[in-house]
């Protein structure tokens, strides 16, 4: 028996490289900084935001923000957690693609005072488009709570398709919540219509 027959196949997923800075018509998506902690704490102390996120506790404070930011800003993770900022560099939200259980997952949130302006559609389309250029054969998974139809519409407009339903635990609500799983297959990103 040869030694080549005993070698394990390389099962490490491809990596997209360091998180980029992405500019859109109205936004800049950039890597987070420790100085973003107060803005993150302010946004995520709002239950209207955290109730739609599975892994964010309520209440949420500045120390929670720092606990999250330290590994995110260390440069050791393969993920792309990007701060959503206006042209004035004020932190208004987060959009990320992170590796979980061997799959790339999209997640996002936005400070409530910036809802209904198309910012999240702009940010999600931009990060997916850039990620797809670096990882063209890679599906992107996501999901929404069943009581968040706006987020589901956003994903469907970009080409995500539902793959199943289930329940996941929501820390902010302290209960199991109905969850719709989605996926964007390679090459299926729909161009964003600019109004």
Image (cartoon, helix red, strand yellow):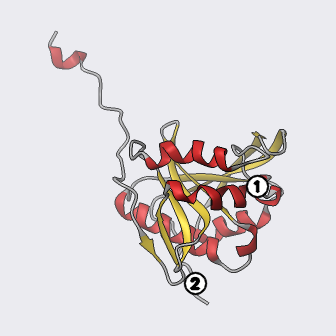
Asked which secondary structure carries label 1, the reply is loop
Q: Is residue 12 left or right of residue 89?
A: left
Q: Distance of mark 2 from mark 1, alpha carbons? A: 32 Å
In percent of width and height, residue 159 lies at 58, 67
- Which image quarter is the N terminus in? top left
Above-or-below relation of 67 to 94: above
Q: Which residue is mark 1?
A: 45
N-terminal of the pair, mark 2 or mark 1, is 1
Above-or-below relation of 34 to 74: below
In percent of width and height, residue 26 lies at 54, 82
Q: Is residue 172 left or right of residue 65?
A: right
Residue 93 visible in the snapshot: yes
The quarter of the picture where residue 154 lies is bottom right
Closer-to-camera residue (33/176): 33
Q: Which residue is mark 2?
A: 193
Farthest residue to the top: give it: 1
Q: Residue at x 55, y 79 (%)?
A: 192
In percent of width and height, residue 182 lies at 64, 54
In percent of width and height, residue 105 lies at 55, 50
Q: Residue at x 48, y 79 (%)?
A: 24
- Which image quarter is the C terminus in? bottom right
């Amino acid at each position: 028996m040869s030694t080549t027959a005993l070698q394990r196949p390389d099962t490490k997923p491809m990596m997209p490289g360091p998180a980029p800075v992405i500019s859109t018509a109205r936004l800049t998506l950039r890597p987070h900084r420790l100085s973003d902690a107060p803005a993150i704490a302010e946004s995520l102390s709002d239950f209207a935001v955290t109730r739609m996120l599975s892994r964010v506790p309520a209440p949420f404070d500045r120390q929670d923000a720092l606990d999250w930011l330290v590994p995110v800003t260390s440069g050791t993770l393969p993920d792309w957690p990007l701060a959503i900022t206006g042209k004035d560099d004020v932190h208004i939200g987060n959009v990320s693609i992170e590796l979980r259980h061997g799959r790339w997952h999209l997640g996002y949130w936005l400070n409530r005072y910036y809802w209904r302006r198309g910012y999240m559609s702009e940010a999600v389309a931009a990060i997916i488009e850039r990620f797809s250029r670096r990882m063209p054969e890679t599906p992107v998974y996501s999901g929404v709570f069943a009581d968040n139809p706006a987020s589901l519409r956003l994903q469907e407009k970009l080409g995500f398709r539902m793959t199943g339903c289930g329940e996941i635990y929501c820390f902010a609500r302290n209960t199991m919540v109905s969850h719709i799983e989605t996926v964007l297959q390679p090459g299926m990103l729909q161009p964003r219509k600019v109004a």
